[in-house]
Amino acid sequence: MNDPAKAIRIGTMISASAGKAAERIGALADMGFESFEPFFWQTTNGQDLAELGKRSLDAIEDRDITISTLGMFGNPLEDQDMDRQTLQGWKDCIDNAHHFGATCVAGFTGRVRNKPLTESLPQYKKVWTELAQRAADKGVRIAFENCAMDGNWATGDWNIAHNPDAWELMFNETPQDNIGLEWEPCHQMVYLIDPLPQIRKWAPKIFHVHGKDATIRWDVIREHGIFGKEKFVFMRTPGFGDSNWTDIISELRLAGWSGSIDIEGWHDPVYRDRLEMTGQMHALNHLKAARGGVFVDIDG
């Protein structure tokens, strides 16, 4: 029976940089994840992505699991050796996404380093207009994660897609229908932006969602501010942070959104190291419950 609940799937991210992505998928395939996002950090390390895609799908076998999105995270706008590897990685992921069954490639926009955000726009337009056409030719969408990587409007090293004001500028430069966002509430909350209303405005541009949350310590902010020595916000695994995921998924459904919410782990200050997968399993069950729980067919 087709399960309408799985119009929104709950999965997790899998590091693919070290060449063990397929094996990791195989190890997690029976734990209840409904999707995986294999991702690369700055470089694919020369891996044969067509072969990796085949092995990844072989690891899934006949389970009801999808790979909708590949991740390629780095800075493709600059011209250092690693930046060039990131740009080539984007091209390779776009060209080989179909070997994974994926229709989206996600990552950072890149940035002209240590310059105000607006000074990246000409290079952004040049690089991403070309990549968007390459992706369109392959039936692939491009999604930018809304992560500042410690940057801001004045300076930064990695990404300009971390602020809705920047999204307005970016999508004006690249109005192509296949360029959008890899959205998550966490990266808005760490800058004290209310993430929930963004769904109503930006849902048509949200191509993929990361399952990551945040805990804001308002008592610390009131006493110490946001530039003091006390940490005022923590990135959290879903189920341990401040977000109401029932509301988030409801807003996504109201907007007609479908796709995968892939958990981005390895950030929680409590559920990490030996507790990492404990936290991820809690997040998996929490998000499934927020999605509505077990599907019941009224006509069944």
Image (cartoon, rainbow, N blue to C red):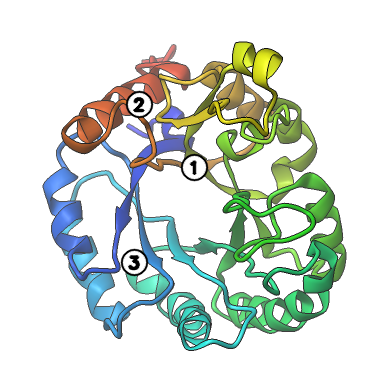
| Rendered residue at 43%/26% (across/down) | 238
Q: Earlier in the sequence, mark 1 or mark 2?
A: 1
User: Which disc, if any, is residue 100?
Assistant: 3
Q: Earlier in the sequence, mark 2 or mark 3?
A: 3
Q: Amino acid at mark 3?
A: Phe
Badge 3 marks a residue whose secondary structure is: helix
Q: Position of residue 213 (x, y in %)?
A: 50, 30
Badge 2 marks a residue whose secondary structure is: helix
Q: Amino acid at mark 1?
A: His
Between 37 and 147, which is closer to the camera in this rendering? 147
Q: Earlier in the sequence, mark 3 or mark 1?
A: 3
Q: Is residue 61 visible?
A: no
Q: Position of residue 50 (x, y in %)?
A: 30, 80
| Rendered residue at 61%/34% (across/down) | 190
Question: What residue is shown with label 1?
Answer: 210
Tell me if 163 is positioned left or right of 66 in this view: right
Badge 1 marks a residue whose secondary structure is: strand
Question: What residue is shown with label 2?
Answer: 283
| Rendered residue at 49%/29% (across/down) | 234
Between 205 and 215, which is closer to the camera in this rendering? 215
